[in-house]
Image: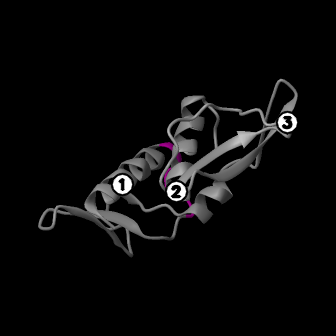
Amino acid sequence: MSNDIDTELFELCKKVYAIIGAKDFDGLWFRYSPVTEQFSPVNHAVGSICPLYISDYLLEKLPKELTKDRIIYYLTLSAKYGDEFKANYVSPTGYLYLFLEPEADTPLESLLQLTIALHKHEINL
């Protein structure tokens, strides 16, 4: 994993941490090393900055469906054009609950972006 990807993932995790915290989180955490100038995962939170969220954890926290104007939108995660992913809420007729851009490079990044977007639209997890 390159430092650019680590930095991008770290920034998304840091934003989500500010939104949902780390209640019941027992995974790896990010720690920054000034020696290597990279973020690395560690097994405990001591001296760490934020959780290294995983897709499973976010899928458990995100609502499985949202309702707007009596239409139910279901949580979806889709692959688009090869290596692009998009998490969103979609109605059975294909309407999107939120318009999110851009697509993400990984399913995890897509779920992190969705979590941030929900918070911006004042939808609590």
Q: Please name the residue shown 61% across and 65% down the image.
A: 56
Sequence-wise first label, 3 or 2: 2
Return the residue found at the far top.
69
Quarter of the picture containing the C terminus is top right
The x, y position of residue 74, in whole percent, is: 78, 45
Q: Rounded to the nearest whole Å, what is the CA distance between mark 3 and mark 2? A: 25 Å
> Quadrant where the N terminus lies?
bottom left
Tag 3, which secondary structure?
loop
Extreme-left residue of the structure: 35
Q: Residue flagged by tag 1: what amino acid is it?
A: Phe
Q: Magenta region: which residues?
A: 19-24
Residue 2, picture quadrant? bottom left
Q: Is residue 37 above or below residue 11?
A: below
Placement of 96 over or under 47, stated as above or below? above
Residue 27 at x, y = what percent? Answer: 48, 70
Mark 1–mark 2 Cα distance, whole angstroms, equals: 20 Å
Residue beneath the point at 63% across and 38% down:
124
Residue 124 within the magenta-colored segment of the rendering = no
Give the numbered dot on residue 83.
Answer: 2
| Classed neighbour count for the residue bearing mark 3: other residues with Cα under 10 Å, few (<14), some (14–19), many (≥20) | few
On the image, numbered disc 1 is attached to which residue?
10
Percent across and percent down for residue 95 are: 77, 32
